[in-house]
Image (cartoon, helix red, strand yellow):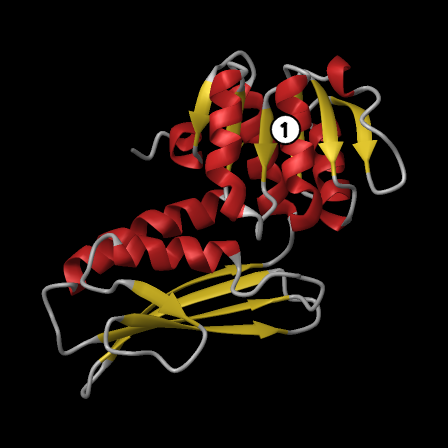
Amino acid sequence: MKIALLGYGKMGQTIERIAIERGHEIVLKKDEFNTYEGLSNADVAIDFSIPAVAVDNISSCFYANVPVVSGTTGWLDHYDEMVSLCTTKEGAFLSSSNFSLGVNIFFELNEYLAKMMSKFDSYRVDMEEIHHTQKLDAPSGTAISLAKGIIENSSYSTWTLDKPKENEIHIEALRIENVPGTHTVTYKSAVDEIEIKHTAHNRDGFALGAVIAAEWIVGKQGVFAMKDVLDLK
């Protein structure tokens, strides 16, 4: 499989290593200094760039008729626009806040627990996410996905980084050197607390999931999620 890497930072380089280990070829390494030349030769593109260029990267794939998997966060105000363009161009698109296989299992566990805890109003939920200091957005896309999973299965209506109101989930976003990603969801009452936590030890889990998603999406048409790739529906 021929892969275009859109974004060639630490994640892009990790994806490159894992893709080559799995027998794939990298035909484009797009960073701020080069163009999209070679994109049309790719079987699939993987976008791990920055919020400012993600929309250009993704739309360029649709115009080049190349399926695209995007792990960039912080640009989702334009998500519906990209879905519409994908549909118009009859393309294939998969965007995820986190491609880690473990995190996607964690998403499912989080939703199941939220549904269960919604019956017990003596507990209040809050979240904490920790990432490396180079991460540009806060809270993380993964934390936002976790919060949405709780909101869809409880009486909470939104999340906040500030002091929360009654119907808000508080997210504490911390930036610490050399932390790939840690997410904790805690339900607290006056007498005890229940906590679920996912800790990434390195970038390999994210990169492997992105490559698996890229392998899966080739030959398909439509808009997908990691639930589709992992058959978690």
**Residue beneath disc 1:** 59
Residue 92: give x, y in percent of width and height: 52, 21
- Horizontal relation, residue 217 to residue 168: left or right: right
| Residue drawn at x 48%, y 55% as measured from the top left | 142
Amino acid tagged 1: Ser
Residue 50: give x, y in percent of width and height: 69, 49
Q: Is residue 44 above or below residue 208?
A: above
* Within-10-Å neighbours for mark 1: few <14, some 14–19, many 20+: some
Rendered image quadrant of residue 226:
top left
| Residue drawn at x 73%, y 35% as measured from the top left | 6
Rendered image quadrant of residue 120:
bottom left
Residue 108: give x, y in percent of width and height: 32, 47
Q: Nearer the viewer, residue 229 or 202?
A: 229
**In this view of the protein, can residue 99 be seen by the observer?**
no
Q: Is residue 46 above or below residue 110?
A: above
- Horizontal relation, residue 46 to residue 216: left or right: right
Q: Quadrant of the C terminus?
A: top left
| Residue drawn at x 50%, y 17% as measured from the top left | 88
